Amino acid sequence: MKIQLALDRLNIQDAIKMAKLVETEIDWIEVGTSLIKEFGMQSVKEMKKAFPYKTILADTKTMDNAKYELEMSFQAGADIVTVMGTAPLVTIKTCLEIAKENNKKIMIDLLNTSEEQIQALLPFTEAIFCEHISKDEQELAGKSNVQTKSRLKEQAVIEVAAAGGITLETVQNLVEQNLDVAIIGSAITKAKNPQETAENFKKQIGGILS
Amino acid sequence: MKIQLALDRLNIQDAIKMAKLVETEIDWIEVGTSLIKEFGMQSVKEMKKAFPYKTILADTKTMDNAKYELEMSFQAGADIVTVMGTAPLVTIKTCLEIAKENNKKIMIDLLNTSEEQIQALLPFTEAIFCEHISKDEQELAGKSNVQTKSRLKEQAVIEVAAAGGITLETVQNLVEQNLDVAIIGSAITKAKNPQETAENFKKQIGGILS
């Protein structure tokens, strides 16, 4: 299972510093939505420049204007871009096309996406599917999804990621569910010792980083 | 009915130039999602600086992290910020709270929002509701909503906006539906003569700009 480091609510330089600290323990670096909306594509450009050999995910949470937003993100250096599962189907299909043209990938963020919408998306097996309990749901409504057994892997041959309050205690559940990507934010970035914490995540996952 | 000028797929300086051209004909200026994701909050700051007495809407399309995204947008000079109707309810409620604390407003973008979700949102009468057919739905799936009679105004005492391919020919439908805001983008920004076109929209609406 890969570790995606989610960087949010930071300025670009602090985000890069944080990623440098844990670089060898993590696989993918996510430029969070808050960085993109605060600093624009500069955040993606600078992250790619700092980590040219890492996979950079731009969490654009695209809802519309798929071609424009994805081309802009890929040009800035993103390798993966996110689109919302609640977006119109035509937007998600366009994201897949633009990603394919650019030899890149998309992640479909299933935040608040209905079962019916998910079923319509499962044929898009080139996409990574992200089960997601949002920050607001965690912080303000006390929700967490990491205890719940994912059913996506049983329904289709797809890569599945999970995000939402993953901790050292709960990450093992994702390994057992055979998920592909654990998206970890504040458990690392707000740890007293982010480097040691990232090492512990890597150990917990079993050292099978690829 | 007010006119909200939607500025998308432009750089900040060209967006400001376009808004200057039609300043006297329009009411609200929307800093589009594409500007925010490309240039960050700088786009909102510069627009407010150029138009300190105009209402500036930041089309953040918030899905999560409501407090952070809204406070950031209001600090940058936004008067209205958008949140998606498909976002978790706790996110929309938080947007309302943060807007109230800042004496500002939110617009709930009903793009791809289910009837059930809309019903849950109707009690939030302080929000502006936006019926929205997206760019991708228009350009790639041939959809348009401006012919459809809105039912929102019949269900609650709320301000309702409409967006999605509104033209000089179709804007009259919105006036007849007693809608509050017509969100107009390319019909003005891509017109041969944006100023004359904006004047014609104003005339068509009946000159009742407030």
Image (cartoon, coloured by chain):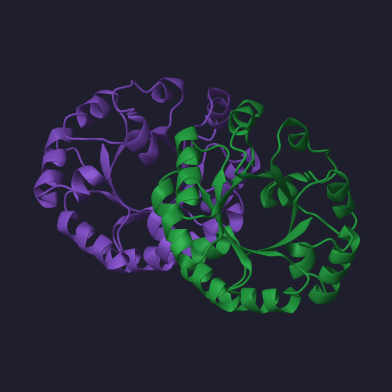
Chain colours: A green, B purple
Residue name at image x 49 percent, y 49 percent: A100
Q: Position of residue A103 (x, y in %)?
A: 51, 55
Residue name at image x 32 percent, y 30 percent: B179
Q: Quadrant of the N terminus of chain A?
A: bottom right
The image quadrant of residue B181 is: top left
Vertical placement of residue B152 versus A91, above or below: above
Q: In the image, is B201 to the left or to the right of A94? A: left
Number of numbered markers: 0
Q: Position of residue B162 (x, y in %)?
A: 34, 34
Q: Is residue B162 visible?
A: no
Q: Is residue A197 visible?
A: yes
Q: In the image, is B206 to the left or to the right of A202? A: left
Vertical placement of residue B180 versus A140, above or below: above
Q: Position of residue B115 (x, y in %)?
A: 53, 23
- The one nearer the camera, A172 or A40, is A172
- The one nearer the camera, B201 or B105, is B201
Vertical placement of residue B98 versus B41, above or below: above
Residue name at image x 84 percent, y 43 percent: A177
- The one nearer the camera, B15 or A76, is A76
Q: In the image, is B101 to the left or to the right of B80? A: right
Vertical placement of residue B155 versus A173, above or below: above
Q: Position of residue A210 (x, y in %)?
A: 76, 62
Residue name at image x 39 percent, y 55 percent: B34
- The one nearer the camera, A33 or A99, is A99
